[in-house]
Amino acid sequence: MTPNLTPGSTKAQKLARKTLAREANRIREISGADLLRNPGRFAANHQHVLGILFDWSNQRIDSDSMTALESLAEAWNLDEFLQAVSRGAKVNSSEGRSALHMALREPRVESSQNEPQFVQDRCEFLDFADSVRDGAVRGFNGNAFTDVVHIGIGGSHLGPALVCDALTADNRLSVHFCSNADRRVLNELLAKLDPARTLFIVASKSYATHETLENARFVKDWMYERVDSNADIAQHFVHITSKQDLNVGMERVLRISRSIGGRFSLWSAMGLPIALYLGSKRFLDLLKGAHEMDRHVLGSSLSNNVAVRSALLGLWNANYLGATSHLVLPYDSRLKLLPAYCQQLEMESNGKSVGSDNQPVDYNTSPVVWGGLETDGQHAWHQFLHQGTQNYSADIVASLDALPASTNLESHQWILANAVGQSSVMLKGNNANSVEAHQVIPGNHGSTLIFLDKLDAHTLGSLLAMYEHKVAYLGHLWGVNSFDQWGVEEGKRVSGILASSLRGENTEDVDESTIQLLRTIRARFKTR
Ligand code: F6P
């Protein structure tokens, strides 16, 4: 069991922590089936906000434990925390920066003379996107663009890829995503594309990410090998970055503020592929959905704030009920990339063991976040979930907008029944007295059902903004900085040294065992 978590030394914080520990001991003695006997449970544990139904009935809570969680939220001033974030407080303490992702979706003030920089930047990339879609911006030989290749990784990839995958668009432009250094993916993609009609986006906040820069170099060479030397290919490249002094000649550069975290950046120019795919109007719908979620979390009481509830239950499961992982389980193929998006958002934000005060923490912070498309998962990891030895929590996400035609409705209803059924079994398990030992399903795993009335730009924007706020609230409760990611740097440094060692260039700073491994790899390395 992890010790009771959360730092905090005020009297209210100590009392909240003590009460919560007592509540956890009580709840652990109540079976999931008994929790569900309360007839008023659904009424007390669901909210319908911005076209999204959040149902917490299958979480391991009752009214007293939920009250204790809300007391913790008050003791940690979660409402003031997010107000401070929205006002630009330097919450990214290690880098001395704000976290201004909410400003990105502030609507334009039409009458305003001097538009904020974010709005000017937004207008620039949306106008460019529409110009490409309308054929006003064309390739070197006057052909309109038909394909876009977005080159980026992590936060410069996952959000845009998720949104483009989730939402259907007209087929004016085909948008392709290339994230890692495996050239097989890029080679297979380029083989299908016409250089004269392809627009490349090089997306990197730092403009220092090896995979992205190498892929950018590769596609530039690919272009040069296929067009006349006198062709002006500047129109075929757009760069999205926070790097101030980027010199790319006549090629277009779209800027992102350094106060926008990569995993919080899809609302910025990083969302260019979304705007190219959906058009500016629907991109603005995405922003509107996120902005309305911002208004919900900034304007609601703690007990009515769906992101606060999500964060409190994340903390409750991870630190008081012993959950070591949290699953994101989409029961809709359009949301198959949601688990990967949430993995980075949650684990890169809160996968930390030193607090913002630079002191080590003595409790668990982010759980392992994983998952995948359902109902496929029911044939892959649900045995583990229902009879394994690890405790977990889950978000089960589905959409209620079935495809047209009754046959599709029947299959859609079957999928929804599985979403609800699996959530129920996760909590209730089965009746141990009526089955043999190897058939017992203990249950006692909490899950939240999240049902979108309709999967469109607006509800997707609201959902993703809710997850951003959940992560920020959780980081504040855990006392960590959710907006930096120092932990990724050492792996990059060592890998760079080993890459040159693999090329036989140097073996400094490399231990003998690794040197022998590299020699073995080099000896067996074959280029086809
Ligand atoms: O290495 C981690 C990381 O910095 C993420 O935080 C970021 O989203 C990703 O790599 C890509 O970084 P960049 O946009 O600077 O290429």
Image: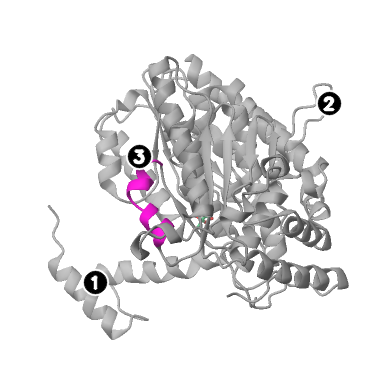
Secondary structure predominantly adopted by residues drawn in magenta: helix
On the image, the x and y values in percent for residue 517 come to: 23, 76
Residue 220, disc: 3
Marked residue nearer the N-terminal end (2 or 1): 2
On the image, the x and y values in percent for residue 129 come to: 54, 25
On the image, the x and y values in percent for residue 81 come to: 79, 55
Per the rendered image, the range of residues in magenta is 374-387
Vertical side of 252 occupied by 194: above or below: above
What's the distance in space between the residues labelled 3 and 2, CA to CA? 41 Å
On the image, the x and y values in percent for residue 8 come to: 78, 72
Residue 504, disc: 1
Left or right: 446 as drawn, with respect to 184:
right
Residue highlighted by disc 2: 112
Mark 2 Cα within 10 Å, few/some/many (few <14, many 20+)? Answer: few
Q: CB atoms at circles 3 and 2 under 8 Å apart?
A: no
**Who's the residue at 69% across and 31% down the image?**
50
> In the image, which is nearer the foreground, mark 2 or mark 1?
2
Q: Amino acid at mark 3?
A: Lys
Q: Secondary structure at mark 3?
A: helix
- The foreground one among 452 and 433 is 433
Left or right: 84 as drawn, with respect to 155:
right
- The foreground one among 390 and 103 is 390
Vertical side of 69 occupied by 232: above or below: above
Disc 1 under 8 Å from ligand 1? The reply is: no
